[in-house]
Image: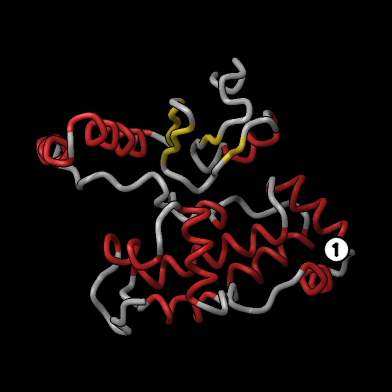
Amino acid sequence: MLAAAGVLDGRRATTHWRHAPLLARAYPEVHVEADALFVEDDGVLTSAGVSAGIDLALALVEQDHGAGLARDVARSLVLFMQRPGGQSQFSAPLALRPPRAPALRAVVDLVAAQPADPHTATSLAATAGITPRHLARLFRTELGTSPARFVEDARLDHAKRLLDAGHGVAEAARGAGFGSTETMRRRFVARLGVAPSRYRARFGTTGPGDSRG
């Protein structure tokens, strides 16, 4: 409704990952952040779903009244303290239904299985047996994204999994194919609004490779 009313034109917004491609296609003036739990842009707030709406509400309580009250509210509701808005939905870019086009499905499966490989538009198109331009058109039509953005999403998703499991930032950067910790840090900050080390401190578990990068 916000998009239809023009309220989101030129603004960043999010919605449930199932509906993000539809929102992006139907309202190209909206900058859809399909992987965010909630987004605030110039006083307009959107969330990804019911549980993400609770995260958003707790964030607003903390913003207006401080972290102490927000923790009390979370405790009274038997909830964890809210996740930051940049925290990903459940592997949203890779949880979409399989593409209809077999060529695109082959590329999606390859990137999801091996995100750290040196994927390029040319190499992915060769895997699909089509031209890079045709591949880009398939990505845009079926997934509402580009091949490069999809590869980045897959690498971010894999890096988050590694950090969640307790691996260090440097190890996660290597394992996800970012090449360097600085490259991964820039991508995390740009896409998720949080540095990998902070993400790991908040969501990671103690485990092997426990070196903090």
Task: Identify which residue, 154 or 29, lies in the foreground.
Answer: 29
The residue drawn where x is 59% and y is 67% is 112
- Percent position (x, y) of residue 161? 41, 68
The residue drawn where x is 21% and y is 46% is 81
Left or right: where 150 falls relative to 185: right
Q: Quadrant of residue 4?
A: top right
- Quarter of the picture containing the N terminus is top right
- Percent position (x, y) of residue 179? 57, 79
- Quarter of the picture containing the C terminus is bottom left
Task: Identify which residue, 110 or 3, lies in the foreground.
Answer: 3
The residue drawn where x is 52% and y is 43% is 17
In this rendering, the answer to whether 151 lies above or below 145 is below
In this rendering, the answer to whether 84 lies above or below 26 is below
Residue receiving disc 1: 132
The residue drawn where x is 79% and y is 62% is 103
Q: Quadrant of residue 9?
A: top right
Neighbour class for label 1 at 10 Å: few (<14), some, many (≥20)? Answer: some
Q: Quadrant of residue 30?
A: top right
Task: Identify which residue, 167 or 100, lies in the foreground.
Answer: 167
Q: Identity of the amino acid at label 1?
A: Pro
